[in-house]
Amino acid sequence: MRLLHILADSVVDGPGLRTVIFFAGCPHHCAGCHNPDSWAVEGGEDYSLQQVVEQIRQIGSHRVTISGGEPFLQQEALYELVNALTGYDIYLFTGYRLEQLLDDALARRILSRVDGLIDGRYIKTLHDYSLSIRGSTNQRILNKKQLQSFFG
Ligand code: SF4
């Protein structure tokens, strides 16, 4: 998988102390994006699944956030990663709205494995400094129970 980097000990990407995996590539190109360097699909470096899992294990936290970039741009790799992280508390950021992902079988399998989802593009005019985890008020933070309600 193509990643920008792996960050240890984040306290701003979900509940608790988390390891953050930044996927390379983003098609959303939101105005005011905090990290336009993440847009290039060929950015970052190639990692094997084994390398990523081993780094996460060595860092030690059982809380992992998958961010980017847009993780669903590398959907197969994302699926392999969430599967390999059974037993971990997983939060996932996406610039897509959840409803845009539900028609895709693989995306649904990924979503069924995560514990929290932050969805939607960043909209600069809806930015609010008082928000935690998300950047703009249109984005949602959905917990596992809320996510499951979308699956019917
Ligand atoms: S989805 Fe996130 S990474 Fe992608 S352009 Fe928007 S703010 Fe930037």
Image (tube, rainbow, N blue to C red):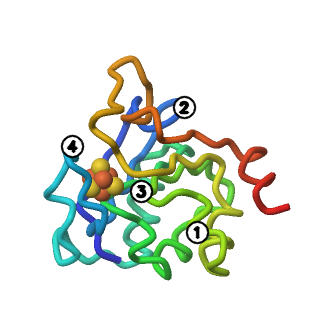
- Label 2 sits on a secondary structure element that is loop
Mark 2 — residue? 15
- Answer whether labels 1 and 4 touch (C-beta < 8 Å): no
Front-lying residue, 41 or 89: 41
Name the amino acid, label 2. Pro
Does label 1 or label 2 sit earlier along the sequence? 2
Rate crowding at label 2 as few (under 14), some (14 to 19) or many (20 or more) other CA atoms within 10 Å: some
In this rendering, position of residue 64 left or right of residue 105: left
Quarter of image, res 47:
bottom left
Can residue 128 be seen here? The reply is: yes
Would you say the beta carbon of the disc 4 residue lies within 8 angstroms of ligand 1? Answer: yes
Residue visible at 51% across and 46% down in the picture = 118
Up-down: is 31 above or below 111? above
Does label 3 or label 2 sit earlier along the sequence? 2
Mark 1 — residue? 101
Callout count: 4
As measured in the structure, the alpha-carbon distance from the residue carrying label 1 to the one carrying label 4 is 23 Å
As measured in the structure, the alpha-carbon distance from the residue carrying label 3 to the one carrying label 2 is 20 Å
Does label 4 or label 3 sit earlier along the sequence? 4
The mark closer to the camera, 3 or 2, is 3
Name the amino acid, label 1. Leu
Q: Which mark is residue 34?
A: 4
In this rendering, position of residue 45 left or right of residue 2: left
- Label 4 sits on a secondary structure element that is loop
- Answer whether labels 4 and 3 touch (C-beta < 8 Å): no
